[in-house]
Amino acid sequence: MTICFFNSHKAWGGGEKWHFDMATCLQDKGYQVHFITSRKSVLLSKLDKTGIKLKTICISNLSFLNPYKVFRVRKYLKRNKIQTLIINLPSDLKIAGIAAKLAGVKKVFYRRGSAIPIRNTLLNRLLFKYCITEIIANSFETKKTILENNPNLFDNSKIHVIYNGINLKEYDSLPSEKIFHRTGDEIVIGNAGRMVPQKGQELLIEIAEKLKAANLNFKLIIAGEGKLKDLLHKKADSHGLSKEVIFPGFISNMKAFMDSIDIFALSSLWEGFGYVIVEAMAGKKPVIAFNTSSNPELVINEKNGFLINDTNIEKFAEKILLLAKDKELRAKFGANGRALVEKRFMYEKTARELELIIAVGEEVDSRQ
């Protein structure tokens, strides 16, 4: 079978990691794999070392209105006899979906990674009716939001949930050099993610203020980059937390990050799939997160962490204090999290489920 992945996003995120992992895995299994991506994208730099057949293209949200670009994609799909196309972004869907229809591609998958309802526009109704054959959602919460604005947009039975998987062998083999060394009995709380409103890191500053008021000896490490970075720095300083809150920037070695902390705190207001939660559980760390969107599919309350209702920062701080005082509970939650990763979120399981769907159309249940 000849498969083509289409992902034009230039930055690196959960969707890009999934596409890269699945493309390389299917190639290892003997599939003929192609990949269409953007010039100067992180994906291109990583894929360039894999031997996967690559094509670059410049895509914008309105590229589907350019007949020349549409027919370039159609020509590539037809010339290489692509049988299955897996599409990433909404902008990709517009041009690649139309091109695939014109090229006669048998299976066209749209992978949805954001738990945001799809707009009920005429263009979307046409694309989902005529250009897409099946949808892959990265969580059950994401699946639910796909049809929220229009229950008749797509056949629900053709929307498959496949969780993002982690390659534990690769994760465990990463160097475990700690990025932070605690002093005395400090409790180290970690958060990692893009510094954007969705991730809610401003709330972490307020939570840290409550921890300091409770006389907890702690450090809060907020890793990542983004447009809110300066604001977060200023907020930490204005709350008198310049010594307690640390901003190390982007961290590529998540194992080293998790090895440096005691508790992982996810402040996101919503997540399509919180991959960083899986990384924390792989590192045997207890997780505290808000009880929203897909988080309950990863964090089982009082088993591998705590879920906090209603964005309640007082309760969030209380649970941090509870875990800070109970080393055995931290170890128990951490062990349970690692076991859940090995059962539900393994890279090999994700690849096997994708292969079942694209090869034989067999339904899967990612929760099993």
Image (cartoon, rainbow, N blue to C red):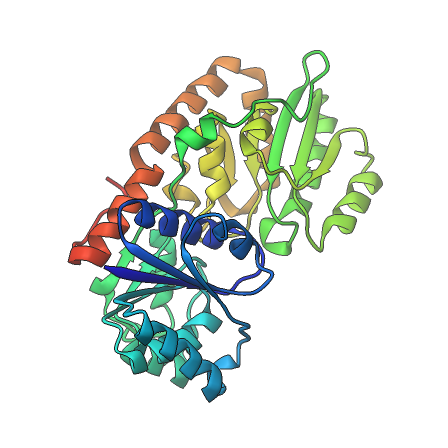
Q: Is residue 205 left or right of residue 108?
A: right
Image x and y of residue 183, in percent: 73, 15
Q: Identify the image quadrant of residue 145.
A: bottom left
The quarter of the rendered structure image containing the C terminus is top left
Whether residue 165 is visible to the viewer of this picture, yes or no, is: yes
| Residue at the (65%, 45%) spot, across then down | 201
| Residue at the (82%, 46%) spot, across then down | 234
Q: How many marks?
A: 0
Whether residue 301 is visible to the viewer of this picture, yes or no, is: no
> Of residues 327 and 106, which is closer to you in this image?
106
Q: Identify the image quadrant of residue 323.
A: top right
The quarter of the rendered structure image containing the N terminus is bottom left
**Farthest residue, direction top:** 184
Image x and y of residue 318, in percent: 58, 29
> Of residues 256 and 137, which is closer to you in this image?
256
Q: Is residue 92 left or right of residue 160?
A: right
State whether residue 122 is above or below residue 193: below
Image x and y of residue 146, in percent: 36, 65
| Residue at the (36%, 80%) spot, across then down | 98
State whether residue 230 is above or below residue 96: above
| Residue at the (79%, 34%) spot, across then down | 241
Q: Identify the image quadrant of residue 156.
A: bottom left
Image x and y of residue 203, in percent: 65, 44
Q: Is residue 202 left or right of residue 159?
A: right
